[in-house]
Amino acid sequence: MANPVKPSEESEKQQLSLGTEAARQLATTTKSVPQMQGISSRWLLKLLPWVQVSGGTYRVNRRLTYAVGDGRVTFTSTGAKVQVIPQELCELPLLRGFEDTAVLQALAERFVQKEYKAGEVITEKGKEADLICLIAHGKVNKIGAGKYGDETVMDVLADGDHYSYEALLESQDYWQFTVKALTPATVLVLKQDAFEAVVAQAPSLQKHITDFKARLKKKQDTSGQAAIELAAGHKGEPVLPGTYVDYETSPREYELSVAQTVLQIHSRVADLFNDPMNQTEQQLRLTVEALKERKEHELVNNREFGLLHNADLKQRIHTRGGPPTPDDMDELLATVWKDPSFFLAHPRTIAAFGQECSRRGIYPTSVDVSGNMVPAWRGIPIFPCNKIPISESRTSSIMLMRTGEKNQGVVGLHQAGIPDEIEPSMNVRFMGINEKAVISYLVTSYFSSAVLVPDALGILESVEIGRS
């Protein structure tokens, strides 16, 4: 005889109401708009003042400057052997503009490679200055005497830096500072007698050096600009100096760069699947977000106009050790001391700076920026920017800038009012429908950036992150 079904078991088998799975067939699901992980805060785009460039080109006029370039030198290596690229010697102030490749090759071949351990002296104060040194790899301290006779670090030099071309122009001169290796360092040196041997056989180099010395004698102010003659504090009726303000004859021009893509949507999707969300609108929204991310990336990294590559080399400094310390940030502030606007750094670099502050028992304050609490140093906000790269050696950079045309700072460039514009200097143009019923839209953004004067942008380089 079969066992009778208990009432409790029978009630479990019988469904007394509509189930949720069936009910969902008649319900409209509440949905989010499509999400995109790559969207960042894009502080640089928000903070840069944007200048209207109606003609597509922006010219930066400056006063004439006699200051010759003080660039960094590039090297090649084969195994442990390091050599300077001959054409890169033109980055030295003494050889800027010199074009005789045969002479440059002869000079490059006379550089001698030397290796130094951390703590070793490379050149010593008071000894005869009879060579030029190129830092191929590593970091060195340039040490001089302080006001009261104590030693002080005058500068930190690293890969591509050099000192001191002046030693090759004079005889019987002596080092005014000591250079000591901070890390293991590879240095290429050119002795004065080797340099003079090449000069003696190269009339073109002799003429170039004569012209270089003549340029050094021209009057210039502390910024290397052609001096404006003035008189002050005089009495009576002296003859006042006559003067004029000279300009650069070949000022730099910035053309608006472009970022573009073609958005493709099948007509069937655009026609039939637009409820509750417009498919074309959502596709366009995410495409625009991606374009803005690329725009900020280019403003930071583009070799033509990107800020990392357009900072003046005299505005680039290195950390005294490895991680970013409060001392390093103060040093960076000294490079952009006239009305600095903000720091910009990778989030992990900001974390490394916070760790260094905690290690020293320092707790930086935060400032309110449009309702957002942002970490700050000396009252200057530090904004995150994930477009600043981190190298394989886990080093990055920190930028500090002054912004705005009136402040002679850093500005963004765009052209508002272009056809089919959806945002300033960004437009969407219908390109047609092909034989496969695919609708195409051209999405374009025009932009660039300019550093109006060199001291508007400073960069702290070789910043180590992740050190315990």
Image (cartoon, rainbow, N blue to C red):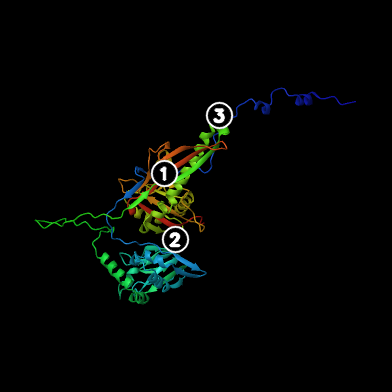
Give the secondary structure at mark 1: strand
Q: Is residue 163 above or below residue 266?
A: below
Q: Which residue is denoted by mark 2 in the rendering?
A: 321
Q: Residue furthest left?
A: 236
For mark 2, does the 10 Å Cα neighbourhood hold few (<14), some (14 to 19), or many (20 or more) residues? some
Instruction: Name the image quarter holding residue 332.
Output: bottom left
Mark found first going from the N terminus, 3 or 2: 3
Check residue 276 in the rendering and tell me which mark sits there, or answer none.
Answer: 3
Which of marks 3 and 1 precedes in the sequence? 3
User: Could you tell me which secondary element the residue under label 3 belongs to?
Assistant: loop
Please tell me whether mark 1 or mark 3 is closer to you in this view: 1
Q: Is residue 159 above or below residue 300?
A: below
Q: Are marks 1 and 3 in contact (CB under 8 Å)?
A: no
Question: How far from the left and from the top, in percent, is residue 138?
Answer: 45, 65
**Figure label count:** 3
Q: Dot 1: within a 10 Å radius of its alpha carbon, few (fewer than 14), some, or many (20 or more) residues? A: many
Q: Residue at x 25, y 60 (%)?
A: 220
Report the residue marked by disc 1: 446
The residue under label 2 is which amino acid type? Gly
